[in-house]
Image (cartoon, helix red, strand yellow):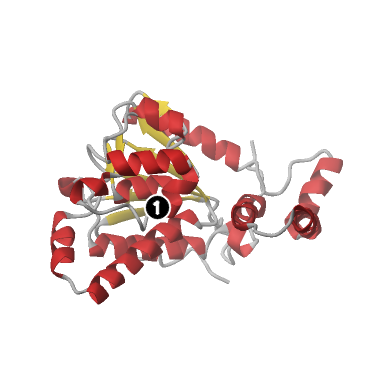
Amino acid sequence: MKTMEDPPQTSLIQLTIDGSCARIELAREDKFNALNVDMITELIEVFEWTKERSAGYIDALEDANGQPYLRTLVLSGRGKHFCAGADINMMRDAGANTPEENRKDSERLDRLFNGLWSHPCFTIGAIQGVALGGGAGLIACLDYVVATENVRIALSEGKLGILPAVIGPYVYRRVGSANFRRLSMQASRVKSDEALRVGFIERVVENVEAFDDEIDSIIAEVLTTGPSAATLAKELTLGFDRWNDDDESLRRWTLDFTSRMRGSREGQEGLSSFLEKRPANWKPEE
C-alpha cells in the first residue's frame, strides 16, 4: 500500500500536502507559468503520485502511518497569470521538429491533460489573469473552477494557424459542441462573465484574496461525500459519455453499478451511519 512519504522533487511547480488536500502551484512566475517540457513532465509525475495516494483510488482513508490519503487537489498558478499556454521556446522547437518528435510531444501533452481529467480526487482550480491554449486545457480538465473577475481564457491555437486538438476532448466535454467550435474558430479571449455562461468556470470572485474562502467552502462540502463515491462518479460519467448500446442495456449497467456501490465497504458504511444516525467515517470531525 502506498504511503504519503517521499513526494516527487520539483523545481517548476510546488506540491504541498495539506491533510487530505494536495495543492499544486505552477511556479514559473517570470514566464507567466508557460508550459515547457520540464514543467509538463513534473506535472505528469505529480498527478500520478497523487493519484496513487487518493482515498477513492485506494478505497482507504489513511496510509499505514495514519496519514490521510488525498481527497481533493487544488491547482493554481503563482503570480499575475495562471498559465500563458505553451512556452515560446517549445513552440519554436515544434516548428523544426520531425513529425515523430512532434508526435512524442503531443503524447506528453495528452498524458498531462488526461492525468488531470481522470484524476480520482475532486480537482479544483484557482485561476487568475490569462489561461491560454494549454492553460485553458488545464481548466477544462478540472472538476470545479474558481476564477477572478479579470480572468481571460482562450483557445488561442487558431491565432498560430493550428487547432486545440490535444486539449479538444476535455474542452468539448466541458463547454459542449457549439461553444467548442465557436471558441476554436474565434481563438479570442473570453472574459469571466462569458466563461461562467458557457460552463468553462463555476464561480467568479473579485480577486485572488477571495480564493481561500471559496476553495475552503467547496473542500468542506466535498469532504462530506464518500471518497470512493466521488471518484467513481467520474467512471459513471465516462460510461454515459461513451455509451453506444441500447437504452435497456444502459439501465442494466446502472443497476449493476448501483449494486456494486451498495455492496462496497464505503457503501455499507454510508448506509449503516445513516441508519444509526451517526456521521460516516469519512466525514471530518466538527
According to the picture, the residue beneath numbered tag 1 turns out to be 168
Q: Residues within 10 Å of mark 1 (few under 14, many from 20)?
A: some
Relative placement, left or right, of 212 versus 98 is: right
User: Could you tell me which quadrant the N terminus lies in?
Assistant: bottom right
Towards the viewer: 189 or 179: 179
Which residue is found at the position 60% from the left and 57% from the top? 242
x and y percentages locating residue 182 in the rendered image: 36, 39
Front-most of residues 4 and 39? 39
Quarter of the image where one finds residue 231: bottom right
In the image, what residue occupies the spot 26% across and 45% down? Answer: 156
| Residue 143 percent across, percent down from the top left | 50, 45
Res 156 visible: yes
Residue 277 is situated, as x and y percent measured from the top left of the image, at: 82, 38
Q: Give the residue furthest to the right.
A: 275
User: Could you tell me residue 166's position as x and y percent?
Assistant: 36, 58
Number of disc labels: 1
Is residue 186 found left or right of 214 in the rendered image?
Answer: left
Residue occupying image coordinates x 53% and y 40%: 219
Q: Amino acid at mark 1?
A: Gly
Name above or below for residue 84 compared with residue 1: above
Does any portion of residue 141 appear in the rendered image?
A: no
Left or right: 10 in relation to 180: left
